Image (cartoon, grey):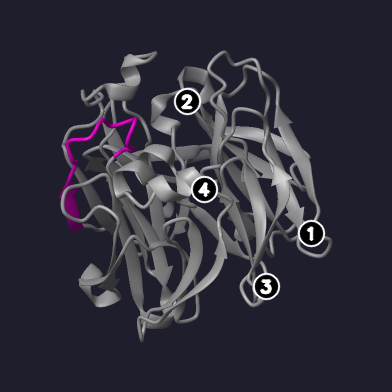
Amino acid sequence: MEIIAKRYRPLTCMGNWVVTSHIGEIAMMNLASKDTKHICDLPVKGVKRFLSKSRTIERLLRTEAKIAVPISGNELIISFHGCIYNVDIVKGTIHPELTYRNGMNGPMRIVPIKGVSGFNDCLAFGEYTLNSQRKNPSAVFTRDYVTGKWKKAYEFVPGRVRHIHGLTPDPENGCVYILTGDFENEAGIWVAKNNFESVEPLLVGSQTYRSGYLYKTECGLIYATDTALEQNYLYCISEGENGKPDLKPFYEMDGSCVSSGETKDKVLFSSTVEADESIRGWRSWINMKRGAGIKSENAKLVAVNKSDLGVSVITQYKKDKLPFKLFQYGYMKVVDAPELESILVYPVGVKKFDAVMLMIKYEELK
């Protein structure tokens, strides 16, 4: 494992270059030479920009961008503070494309949907709003690659789900899976077809189905649960009798999973050190009690073989002493760097390695 740089949060890779969020700006770093170049400033007001030079304040104010998706050789989509922006890395420009619904800072993921029968090629995300009263609907939005226009593609009725954790395209089966949360009948995995005109439940109604990431492997679909309420597991969904889904746990996780990534032959899941969800209101922001489903004070990164579901622990870091919710949970952001046959890992909210970009070679994942 190699230390690359501090406070360069990896967002996405473009060849040997990684796009990063770096102290109020978007910057690119060449992973071979370690050369960096400024692309543009993030829309952060002067006072916040100045205060965010402190890593502790940066965590408090959430002034790092967390999501970027390439849409062409020189354009990116970036989600930041309630808006989706278009960034031209050649011209160094940034302009807004879509403002989120009130109460939404950003989605958990933005994913490309390409080559899926019944779907136009597009970018897509699910709304991730606070929605504590369940009065608002939760929608899927898509962006056409040709026109660059965003539209609402599907909407759950108010009260059906709290919000949407993620989307996973499945070209082989001509569908897109929608992952929803949070509690009881809200948590589930749904199957969307025909440009989201048809949405049907696959597994719905339990913390067992609460997840943010779903992956196709040779053994079936796999995911990690994302709950602070009870024991978390890695699960595999295969086809059972009469075509019904057969769900089996194959690994016990130390905590919930809010960050994941994959390489050609492995899936990586980071466990999260988060707070007890039963503590609400202002006390939740300073609470230092772990949830019932958080079994360790360490954020742990595990790798799963797509061929046989073998699991290995890659690294782990202890949560620091700052309040869980106020200064962010302990976890690891993962970005694949296929050109260098490596993954990039960015720990958050942990001792010693908080905000340090690390590079791990594929061969170290064995």
Q: Amino acid at mark 4?
A: Gly
Q: Earlier in the sequence, mark 1 or mark 2?
A: 1
Residue 181 in the image: x percent, y percent? 50, 29
Q: Amino acid at mark 2?
A: Asp
Q: Earlier in the sequence, mark 2 or mark 4?
A: 4
Q: Which mark is residue 182?
A: 2
Q: On the image, numbered disc 4 is attached to which residue?
A: 46
Q: CA distance from mark 3 to mark 1?
A: 11 Å
Q: Earlier in the sequence, mark 3 or mark 1?
A: 3
Pointer 2 local density, CA inside 10 Å: few below 14, some 14–19, many at least 20: many
Tag 4 secondary structure: helix
Measuring 48% from the left and 52% from the top, which residue is drawn there? 66
Q: CA distance from mark 1 to mark 4?
A: 31 Å
Residue 259 in the image: x percent, y percent? 39, 48
| Magenta highlight range | 314-329
4 and 3 marks in contact (CB < 8 Å) = no
Pointer 4 local density, CA inside 10 Å: few below 14, some 14–19, many at least 20: few
Q: Amino acid at mark 1?
A: Gly
Residue 130 located within the stretch drawn in magenta: no
Q: Which mark is residue 72?
A: 3
Measuring 23% from the left and 31% from the top, which residue is drawn there? 294
Snapshot quadrant of residue 113: bottom right
Q: On the image, numbered disc 1 is attached to which residue?
A: 148
Q: Which mark is residue 98?
A: none
Q: Earlier in the sequence, mark 1 or mark 4?
A: 4
* Relative to 288, 203 lies left or right: right
Q: Amino acid at mark 3?
A: Ser
